Image (cartoon, rainbow, N blue to C red):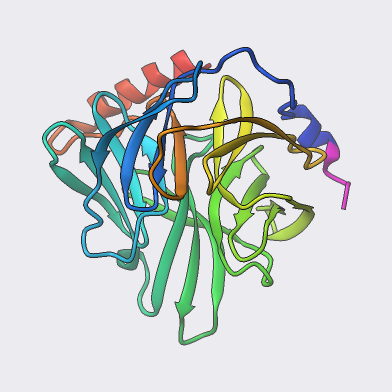
């Protein structure tokens, strides 16, 4: 179970308590979006997302300016939080011939795609669970690998390295470490909290629980440490994202211009 510890160690996020963190965003179970002051952890409501007739929203990703991307069960939808205009970036069922699929979690992968987990709960050939990635610049969709069959679905996912993906289990409180080259389980970390989302801020990985408490998370040992409580969120918390933008090509924008913006954003992140 520890054969890939060298890989994980190279991508270690320590559990060092920080003296203030960057501002970020969280989402409530009622689809309200809040900005959070990184110094005080005070949340301020800024928008409420229309769930577009779907079961519910389960994760968000900041896409720059006043826009937010949401994973709403089987759709990735971008919202302008000033005008209320929404644009569907991807519909999961368009990439499957049959069955009924549900997507959850949302992360910027290391190769600048949108990563999430997929659970096919109506599938003529059996139940499938997979990590998947979508490139909004090319429209290409890819199942990266399957994952542990005892994990029904993941609330959120996080990519540690080119071969390692974390899944935040919603049916029981644990994190599963998966090798996406073959779908094998590398490790499993039990959590003494009710997790809702992964959140990376200033090079540190956190877990946000459904009571708006924030914990640092060590990807090697699985240890968590309480950081602080976010105040001002109504009801349960279901998602979180940093203020580092993932750029989505606007409708009608030439592909090379959009890719130029992505390269610039990537350089700033590096």
Instruction: Indicate yes or no whether the magenta region holds residue 159.
Output: no
* Residue with the most extreme bottom position: 124
In-image side of 146 versus 82 (left or right):
right
Q: Which quadrant of the view contains residue 42?
A: top left
Q: Residue at x 36, y 79 (%)?
A: 98
Residue 4 picture location, percent across and down? 83, 43
Camera-side residue of 159 and 211:
211
Q: Which quadrant of the view contains residue 127?
A: bottom right
Up/down of 234 relative to 246, above or below = below
Residue 38 picture location, percent across and down? 49, 20
Q: Residue at x 33, y 68 (%)?
A: 93
Q: Is residue 138 visible?
A: no
* Residue with the most extreme right position: 2
Instruction: Indicate yes or no whether the magenta region holds residue 2.
Output: yes
Query: Which stretch is magenta?
Result: 1-5
Q: Is residue 204 visible?
A: yes
In-image side of 178 versus 65 (left or right):
right
Q: Residue at x 67, y 72 (%)?
A: 149
How many labels, in total? 0
Residue 269 picture location, percent across and down? 49, 18
User: How would you classify the magenta stretch by its main secondary structure?
Assistant: loop
Camera-side residue of 104 and 28:
28
Residue 1 picture location, percent across and down? 87, 53
Q: Residue at x 31, y 21 (%)?
A: 260
């Amino acid at each position: 179970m520890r054969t890939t510890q060298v890989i994980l160690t190279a991508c270690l996020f320590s559990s060092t308590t920080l003296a203030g963190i960057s501002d970020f965003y969280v989402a409530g179970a009622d689809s309200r979006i809040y900005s959070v002051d990184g110094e005080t952890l005070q949340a301020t409501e800024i928008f409420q997302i229309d769930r577009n007739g779907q079961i519910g929203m389960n994760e968000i990703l900041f896409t720059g300016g006043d826009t937010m991307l949401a994973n709403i069960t089987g759709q990735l939808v971008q919202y302008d939080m000033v005008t209320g205009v929404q644009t569907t970036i991807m519909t999961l069922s368009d990439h499957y011939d049959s069955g009924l699929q549900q997507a959850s979690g949302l992360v910027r992968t290391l190769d600048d795609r949108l990563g999430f987990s997929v659970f096919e709960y109506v599938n003529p050939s059996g139940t499938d669970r997979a990590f998947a990635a979508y490139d909004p610049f090319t429209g290409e969709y890819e199942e990266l690998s399957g994952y542990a069959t005892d994990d029904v679905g993941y609330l959120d996912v996080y990519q540690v390295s080119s071969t390692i993906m974390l899944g935040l289990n919603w049916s029981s409180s644990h994190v599963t470490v998966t090798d996406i080259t073959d779908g094998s389980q590398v490790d499993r970390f039990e959590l003494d909290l009710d997790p809702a989302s992964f959140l990376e801020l200033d090079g540190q990985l956190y877990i946000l629980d459904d009571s708006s408490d924030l914990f640092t998370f060590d990807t090697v040992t699985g240890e968590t440490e309480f950081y602080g409580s976010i105040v001002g969120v109504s009801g349960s918390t279901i998602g979180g994202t940093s203020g580092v933008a993932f750029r989505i090509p606007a409708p009608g924008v030439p592909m090379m211009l959009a890719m130029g913006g992505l390269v610039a954003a990537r350089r700033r992140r590096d």
